Amino acid sequence: DGGITQSPKYLFRKEGQNVTLSCEQNLNHDAMYWYRQDPGQGLRLIYYSQIVNDFQKGDIAEGYSVSREKKESFPLTVTSAQKNPTAFYLCASSIGTGMNTEAFFGQGTRLTVV
Amino acid sequence: AQSVTQPDIHITVSEGASLELRCNYSYGATPYLFWYVQSPGQGLQLLLKYFSGDTLVQGIKGFEAEFKRSQSSFNLRKPSVHWSDAAEYFCAVGARDSNYQLIWGAGTKLIIKP
């Protein structure tokens, strides 16, 4: 079945560590996105990529980094510069980035700082 | 700037009763409108979307939504809820001014009473 796979489902990070969240899609979508979700808030865009080897910052990119070396993959690194990384992270993809394109979501990764 | 307001953080409805979840947006022109549903600890799934045409749109799982330009609203409705509808519901708006990225409401958590 086609879809988006995020791993791991749960991730624990010590203070000062970098961690990388995986996102893989087999939908042949050009666009991919990373969102952060906190309780009582909507989704906030961290980074997005419209095409391989290209990506743009979203609203809350500070403390995060991404790469898009392959169409299928869009990993997110949460760096030690991100002061409050505990959150639920969602990866999504869409055929394009026009307003009429549906976003398909992965199951999310819950990151906790210990 | 565009914004999306979901006035109700929580809504409790008895099983079998009707449901209406509110969504108001702020945007000068007609935006692209979406409703997504999120089950606990899961990703988001598209329920329905409005781009143009008939202002009453039908979605999956028996949901519908009506676009009302005069009220800047896009409320989600279901005639009779089932226990499996318990989830969090997000309204989102896409517009040219936001570089086609979705602006998300904070979500409404639906609780079903047996």
Image: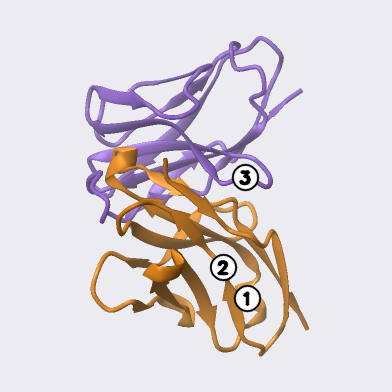
**Disc with the residue nearer the chain's start (2 vs 1):** 2
Q: CA distance from mark 1 to mark 3?
A: 23 Å
**The disc labelled 1 sits on which kind of residue?**
Ser
Determine if residue A111 is in view. Answer: no
What hue represents chain B? orange
The subunit letter for the residue under badge 3 reads: A
User: What shade does chain A have?
Assistant: purple
- Where on the picture, by quarter, is residue A53? top left
- Eye-nearest disc, 2 or 1: 2
Q: CB atoms at circles 1 and 3 under 8 Å apart?
A: no
Q: Position of residue B77 (x, y in %)?
A: 52, 79
| The C terminus of chain B - image quarter | bottom right
Q: Position of residue A8 (x, y in %)?
A: 56, 36
Q: Which residue is mark 3?
A: A41
Q: Which residue does the numbered mark 2 point to in the structure image?
A: B22
List the residue tagged with mark 1: B84
Label disc, if present, on residue B53 of the rendered structure: none
Q: Amino acid at mark 3?
A: Gln
At horizontal 56% and vertical 46% (from top left) the residue drawn is A42
Label 3 close to label 2 by CB (< 8 Å): no
Q: Chain letter for mark 2, please.
A: B
Up/down of A57 relative to B5, above or below: above
- Residue appearing at x 26%, y 56% in the figure: A100
Q: Amino acid at mark 2?
A: Arg
Q: Nearer the viewer, residue B67 or B40?
A: B67
- Neighbor class of circle 1 (other Cα within 10 Å; few <14, some 14-19, many 20+) is few
Left or right: residue A42 versus residue A67 is right
Q: Indicate the secondary structure of the residue bearing disc 2.
A: loop
Is B92 situated above or below B70? above
Q: How is the image coloured?
A: by chain
Task: Give the residue at x 67% y 23%.
Answer: A84
Alpha carbon distance from label 2 to label 1: 20 Å
